[in-house]
Image (cartoon, helix red, strand yellow):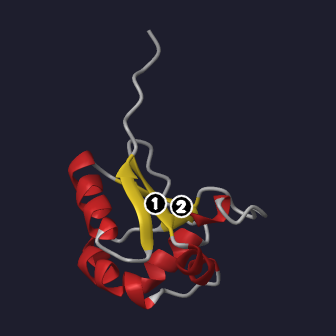
Amino acid sequence: MLRHFVELFSGASDGCTNVVNVMVQLTTEAAHAVRGHELPAELREAEQNLRPLELALEPLHPGAGDSSLATWFRILVDDEASAERVAGELRASPAVASAYVEPLSAPPA
């Protein structure tokens, strides 16, 4: 999962089209570590629990100079139930300031 989390933080994605976004805000320290391709100790338990899902963490604002924007990431998940599980696991980590499932948008009428 370290590999997957590091890939996620560096912007890798699997190209899925029907995915659910899990929006994640890390603490400043954790975001800095992840952007440096390191897994903070505070995320190791979540990483171990979520490893079978083979997820990637992507920066929401790559290259952002604003430190508050640099703390935001997303994870692409195949379905809403898995997305809720991912968000819940991440919320349990002290390295995570916020994690939630982004509501699905309705198609235009």
Which residue is located at x 43 percent, y 77 percent?
Answer: 95
Q: Amino acid at mark 2?
A: Phe
Looking at the image, which is closer to me, 31 or 79? 31
Rendered view: 14 above or below 29? above
Which residue is located at x 34 percent, y 80 percent?
Answer: 47
48 relative to 25 in the view: left or right: left
- Pinpoint residue 90: horizontal percent, then vertical percent: 33, 68
Q: How many marks?
A: 2
Instruction: Verify CB contact (< 8 Å) between mark 1 and mark 2.
Output: yes
Which residue is located at x 48 percent, y 86 percent?
Answer: 39
73 relative to 106 in the view: left or right: right
Looking at the image, which is closer to me, 13 or 94? 94
Rendered view: 79 above or below 93? above
Asked if one can make out residue 85 in the rendered structure from this viewpoint, the answer is: yes
Q: Quadrant of residue 69?
A: bottom right
- Report helix, strand or loop for mark 1: strand
Residue 24: assigned label: 1
- Pinpoint residue 60: horizontal percent, then vertical percent: 60, 56
Q: Amino acid at mark 1?
A: Val
For the N terminus, the quadrant is: bottom left
Residue 73: assigned label: 2
The residues bearing labels 1 and 2 have C-alpha atoms spaced at a distance of 5 Å
- Report helix, strand or loop for mark 2: strand
Q: Quadrant of residue 105?
A: top left
52 relative to 58 in the view: left or right: left
- Pinpoint residue 30: horizontal percent, then vertical percent: 53, 79
